[in-house]
Amino acid sequence: MRPGAPISAAPTRATSPRMPAKTGETLGRIGSLEVRMARNFKEVRKAQRLRYQVFYEEMSAIADANTLATRRDADPFDAYCDHLLVVDHASMKRNKLGRLKPEIVGTYRILRQEIADQHAGFYTAAEYDIQALIDANPGKRFMELGRSCVLKPYRNKKTVELLWHGIWAYVLRYKIDVMLGCASIEGTDPDALAGQLSFLHHNARAPEKWRVRAVKDRYIEMNRLPSDQVNAKQALRSLPPLVKGYLRLGAFIGDGAVVDPQFGTTDVLIIMPVSELNTRYVNYYGADASRYSS
């Protein structure tokens, strides 16, 4: 569940993070679960530890020395991205001061175009030529989604709906026109993933005006099987829940996959123009993101 692949440079410790306006504001709530933005960098660190637990301990990511030492999945982008959190008020954990704090059980990392332009650009640009799409749409506001992560016991409809409720509220607040980011399929052998990649190519490939190609030296052909040789039901069943969720929302898939050996995954680009989102889901969360507002 990790949209986005690591940049090639070794991660460094993020400092002096820029926190978003209305930091910590509640965006939605279901029972004991609350979705909101991180309140401070201490909470970002907790989100990084959650990411480490899922990506490195549960999945097959390969940690470098710094990641092993800190037991946090961190990179320089964390300092200026916004961090969406799902916290469980029924699961309280003591911090270093002995105070009880609700456990962080889910997170998404968000990077708006104007913030990316002030720093190192979009993280996804290491894998896909997204600048060409941005340049072709000068009047549109882009937003990158990445580092999606949910603690295993919370991987259910309720948590996912809260995450998306928070994202939708964020999209409305900042008048975002296009969401993008990478989604990962476990495994690094494209031939072993031929069914899934070919299914995405034949059924969800972005139309020309939204098409983005993987960077030349990392491009992996997704059209590995003719459409009549793809078992659609099996391919759809094999796709990660996150990818299937994006497809239900109306997402497009970019041109070409990228193998990420560090994380043991094959990445595909997700492109979600807000104007193209499935109206059923927009109506479900509410045109004003009011469904789970507290």
Image (spheres, helix red, strand yellow):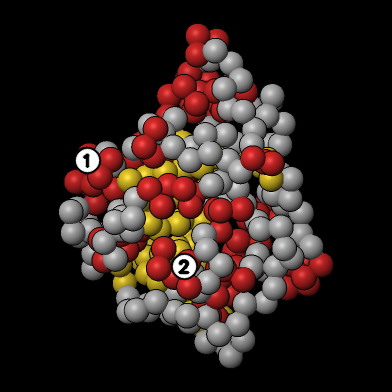
Q: Residues within 10 Å of mark 1 (few under 14, many from 20)?
A: few
Q: Nearer the viewer, mark 2 or mark 1?
A: 2
Left or right of 50 in this view: 173: left
Location of mark 2 (residue): 117
Q: Residue at x 49, y 62 (%)?
A: 109
Q: Residue at x 77, y 70 (%)?
A: 66
Who comes first in sequence, dot 2 or dot 1? Answer: 2
Q: Residues within 10 Å of mark 2 (few under 14, many from 20)?
A: few
User: Residue 281: x and y, percent?
Assistant: 26, 43
Q: Residue at x 38, y 48 (%)?
A: 136
Residue 76 seen in the current view: yes
In terms of image quadrants, where is residue 174?
A: bottom left
Residue 82's label in the rendered image is none
Query: What is the CA distance from the residue labelled 2 to the residue labelled 1?
Result: 31 Å
Front-lying residue, 228 or 208: 208
Left or right of 216 in this view: 274: left
User: Residue 226: x and y, percent?
Assistant: 54, 12
Front-lying residue, 38 or 172: 172
User: Residue 74: x and y, percent?
Assistant: 64, 68
Left or right of 169 in this view: 197: right
Quadrant assignment for the C terminus: bottom left
Q: Is residue 213 above or below residue 135?
A: above
Helix, strand or loop at label 1? It is helix
Residue 93 seen in the current view: no
Q: Amino acid at mark 2?
A: Asp
Residue 279's label in the rendered image is 1
User: Residue 82: x and y, percent?
Assistant: 45, 70
Q: Amino acid at mark 1?
A: Thr
